[in-house]
Amino acid sequence: MSNQYELDELNKKLLEIIQDDFPLTKEPFTEIGARVGLTAEETLACLTKLKEKGILRHFGASIDSRKLGFVTTLCALSVPEDKEEVIAQQIAKRPEVTHCYLRKHKFNIWFTLVAKDWPIVEKILEGIAQETGFSPRHFPAKKMFKLKAVFRLAKK
């Protein structure tokens, strides 16, 4: 069974607009709708359906935590395969965790963590170790290379 969902051209256009050209106006959904031939209400209904289907995972601002003085780190944990799903879900529920993945690797759970400072990172990781019985390692970034990922979907 495939996780892939077939999108029509209208939804592809909507996703491209909100990724790369979201209007910062008083009525953004009216403007987006006008670009694709929909009302604001129809636009919101389409985006709501995409959110419900899991295609649109997040809709909101992405704040640069580093500019606010926060630190981020990539973390990894090695757990028995029969416990990985439960532990990954437990970790993913933490408000400081921005991404959490299962991997085919000795370290089979990887996650990113954002905190106010390094002592708080250590405290969070100690808490995860106490809760799960497994000690995560973390790998602070030496240098960040921020990429802008825009998925081109619509026919041009």
Image: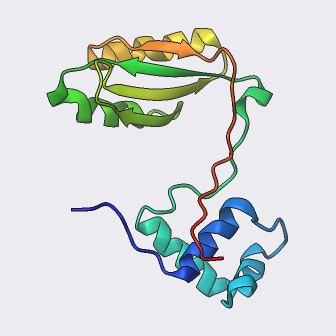
Q: In the rendered view, tell whether residue 124 sits above or below residue 113.
A: above
What is the residue that sits farthest to the front in this orientation?
156
Q: Residue 39 falls in which quadrant of the image?
A: bottom right
Q: From the image, which quarter does the N terminus lie in?
A: bottom left
> Where does the image place residue 21, in percent across and percent down from the top left?
76, 65
> Where does the image place residue 26, in percent across and percent down from the top left?
84, 72
Q: Residue 152 falls in which quadrant of the image?
A: bottom right
Residue that appears at 49% across and 14% down: 138
Q: In the rendered view, tell whether residue 44 sits above or below residue 98.
A: below
User: Can the viewer see residue 104 in this picture?
Assistant: yes
> Where does the image place residue 125, in percent across and percent down from the top left?
45, 15
Q: In the rendered view, tell whether residue 32 sits above or below residue 94.
A: below
The front one of 80 and 13 is 13
Q: Say whether residue 131 is left or right of residue 14.
A: left
Residue that appears at 43% across and 68% down: 52
User: Can the viewer see residue 45 in this picture?
Assistant: no
Q: Say whether residue 115 is left or right of residue 112.
A: right
Q: Say whether residue 53 is left or right of residue 59.
A: left
Residue that appears at 62% across and 11% down: 118
Q: Count the labels in the image.
A: 0
What is the residue that sits farthest to the right in this orientation?
25
The front one of 127 and 112 is 112
Q: How are the colours assigned in the image?
A: rainbow
Q: From the image, which quarter does the C terminus lie in?
A: bottom right
Q: Say whether residue 20 is left or right of residue 133.
A: right
Q: In the rendered view, tell whether residue 100 sits above or below residue 41.
A: above
Q: Residue 6 falls in which quadrant of the image?
A: bottom left
> Where does the image place residue 84, in percent across and percent down from the top left?
24, 30
